[in-house]
Image (tube, helix red, strand yellow):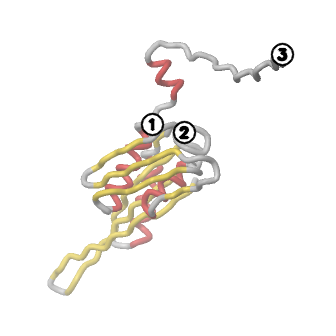
Amino acid sequence: MVEKVVFINRSAKVVKGGRRFSFSALVVIGDKAGRVGIGLGKSTEVSDAIKKGGEDARNHMVAVSLKGPTIPHEVYCRYGGAKVLLRPASPGTGIIAGKTVRAILESVGIKDILSKSLGSSNAANVVKATLKGLLSLRLQEDIYKSRGLQMKKVEAPKAPEATPAA
């Protein structure tokens, strides 16, 4: 399991004696084999917030449809003001993504992908938009099965036979 802290937020409450700080940690956890979870932990200490976020992420893990080291098709997803575009990439491309999107893509086990984060840069919403996009991915076999169709086997094209020159 890979655990990554995406964002730590510090908030302050002003009281009679000064400021009281509290922290929230956005944590992504994945097994690098198609399962990923996100969690938010809050506490007065950073380490406790990270620990709580990790437990929350472990409890909310979901499976994602992958096609080898990339995704089966392009997807555009929104969550709040955050918009994320994910595109499959050819082998050897790597993960072309920003910090927050990269954390979730690495945790799920994707090796080659192109992405663009548009709109809001709020880390929580960008991560949730990315996860929503990954959950909307469907493999070709699953689509055929849900429609009650059989997949046709495609044979490799045969080399043209040599015709004698006249």
Mark 1 to mark 3: distance in Å? 55 Å
- Is 25 on the left-hand or right-hand side of 16? right
Q: What is the x, y in percent for residue 117?
A: 37, 57
Instruction: Give the amino acid at mark 3.
Output: Ala
Q: Assign a secondary structure to mark 1.
A: loop
> Type of residue at label 1?
Leu
Label 2: few (<14), some (14–19) or many (≥20) C-alpha neighbours in 10 Å: some
* Residue 35 appears left or right of 160: left
Q: Residues within 10 Å of mark 1 (few under 14, many from 20)?
A: some
69 shown above or below 16 = above
Would residue 60 appear left or right of 91 to someone viewing this image? left
Residue nearest the viewer, comparing 21 with 37: 37
Say which label, 1 or 3, has the lower sequence index. Answer: 1
Find residue 77 and report its image quarter: top left
Residue drawn at point x = 63 percent, y = 17 percent: 153
Label 2 element class: loop
* Residue placed most toward the observer, 1 or 124: 124
Whole-percent x, y for residue 89 in the image: 55, 47
Residue 166 badge = 3
Identify the residue under disc 2: 66
* Residue, disc 1: 137
The residue at the point 44 percent across, 70 percent down is 47
Label 1 close to label 2 by CB (< 8 Å): yes
